Image (cartoon, rainbow, N blue to C red):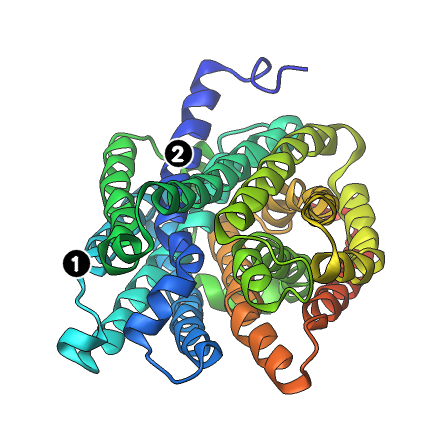
Amino acid sequence: MNILRKFKTSELKVIAVAALGGALEFYDFMIFAFLANTISPQYFPATQHINSLLGLFGAFTVGYLARPIGGLIFSHYGDLQGRKKAFYFSILLMAIPSLLIALLPNYQHIGVIAPLTLVLLRVVQGLAVGGEIPGAITFTIEHIVANKRGRAIVLIFFALSLAVLFGQSVTALLHYSLTETQFYHWGWRIAFLIGSILGVVGGYMRKNISETPLFKAAKSQRKESYIPIVYLLKNHFLPLLQGLSILCLDAVSMFLLFLYMPTYLINFKLHNSIPVEKVHLLNSVSLAIFSVFMLLFGYLSDVVGRKKLILIGSLLLIVLPYPMYKTLLNGSTLAVLFSLVTLGVSFSLVASSYGAMLAELFPAKVRYTGVGLVYNLAFAAFGGTTPLITTYLIKVTQAPIMPAYYLMLLAVLSLLGTLAINTNKLN
């Protein structure tokens, strides 16, 4: 199976621009999570380390809460004026704050201005990311025929996974290359500097892309003015709820299984502790395997249907988290890797299929707004709050198993929402 062979050259160019640009922007945003243990005491000093983590994850959450606002701004503009310009400006709005974070003095040097500035920069990045992934999904869907959309979208998500893997690898490489003191004082800033440079590269790539044919057709047929968000809520409210149920599981799974996992294993593992550098290596291996399976299932979604794969993935994420998290907390290094891979492969069934399914829930005239609203609400209300909520629940209950229960709850909601989707009514 060659997932690229059946695409035209023009389609591959579209996928490349969406995937590579999105990956660069995703790296910029996600590197923050990987460096949590290093950044938190420098900008949110506290007597207990867990309180520093809560402060940093609070800043992380604020960035995610800004995503729906950014999504509304970019999607409103994109549905009325075109996908291209919104797609271009979102990545530039990401690169500049990343550079400023790399240069930002810590609390010891400028006091309370340091955490306040960090939060502000995260808000700006949240606004940018709010328009990025929905834009990539919409832009690609509207260039690709229906029977190739699953594999097209999964290539974008594969690139996003590679961006997370790249961020994890950069973090691990810096840990291996520098002393602990060097990494703490200045080494971590290199990761943000790399992100800012890559963001500029992504902006250059998008400068000369063409507008989507479906948007051009929808705009030419437009007979009266409308407000996309109002039209969407009035005429497509049920698809919003259905899409939200699936995306909430995706958002929480991505954070719990990959972005928050290094912090979780370093701070809360009960027995058979694992060195920091090995934790990052295990996470990288798990993410790489997840990405490969996501590619395979994305291809399969065009053959057997996206709904079936999402249902199977949701069922597995209801059954597996409790025993797998027990293993994460108490098992050996090899057992931990097995648990990470098992959960990751289960999640890949959902991650491979939701993008095309989400875009097909809405017509072209409000597709950017629909995808943006669902995606950003899910990642703001559930994904972005996951580190904060789970860390708080662990602190209150003194039960490190709490993330498993949270994941299982979201999987139940995804199962119910997916069952309610009528595939005959998809766009």
Residue 400 visible, this angle = yes
Q: Horizontally, is 37 left or right of 194 in the view? A: right
Percent across and percent down for residue 415 are 80, 58
Asked whether the viewer can see residue 224, the reply is: no
**Where 95 falls versus 16 (above or below)?**
below
**Residue type pointed to by label 2:** Leu
Q: Residue at x 38, y 31 (%)?
A: 17
Toward which corner of the image does residue 174 lie, by quadrant? top left
Work out how far the residue at label 2 is from the one at label 1, CA to CA, in angstroms.
25 Å
Q: Residue at x 68, y 33 (%)?
A: 293
Left or right position of 333 against 56: right
Name the amino acid, label 1: Leu
Which image quadrant: the N terminus? top right
Q: Earlier in the sequence, mark 2 or mark 1?
A: 2
Q: Where is residue 374 in the image (x, y as percent from the top left)?
A: 56, 61
**Neighbour tally class for label 2: few under 14, some 14-19, many 20 plus, Cα within 10 Å:** many
Q: Which is nearer the eye, 86 or 57?
A: 57
Assess disc 1: are there few (<14), some (14-19) or many (≥20) residues with their C-alpha within 10 Å of its C-alpha.
some
Is residue 48 left or right of 269 when viewed as pictured? left
Res. 129 image quadrant: bottom left
Q: Residue at x 59, y 51 (%)?
A: 362
Q: Quadrant of the C terminus?
A: top right
- Asked whether the residues under the numbered discs 2 and 1 touch, taking CB atoms below 8 Å apart as contact, a structural biologist would say no
Q: Position of residue 161 (x, y in %)?
A: 52, 41
Can you identify the residue that label 2 sits on?
20
Q: In the rendered image, which residue does mark 1 sit on?
A: 103
Q: Nearer the viewer, residue 243 or 172?
A: 172
Q: Quadrant of residue 255 in the image?
A: bottom right
* Nearer the observer, 172 or 389: 172
Quick one: 172 or 200, which is closer to the camera?
172
Disc ID at residue 2: none
Q: What element carries label 2?
A: helix
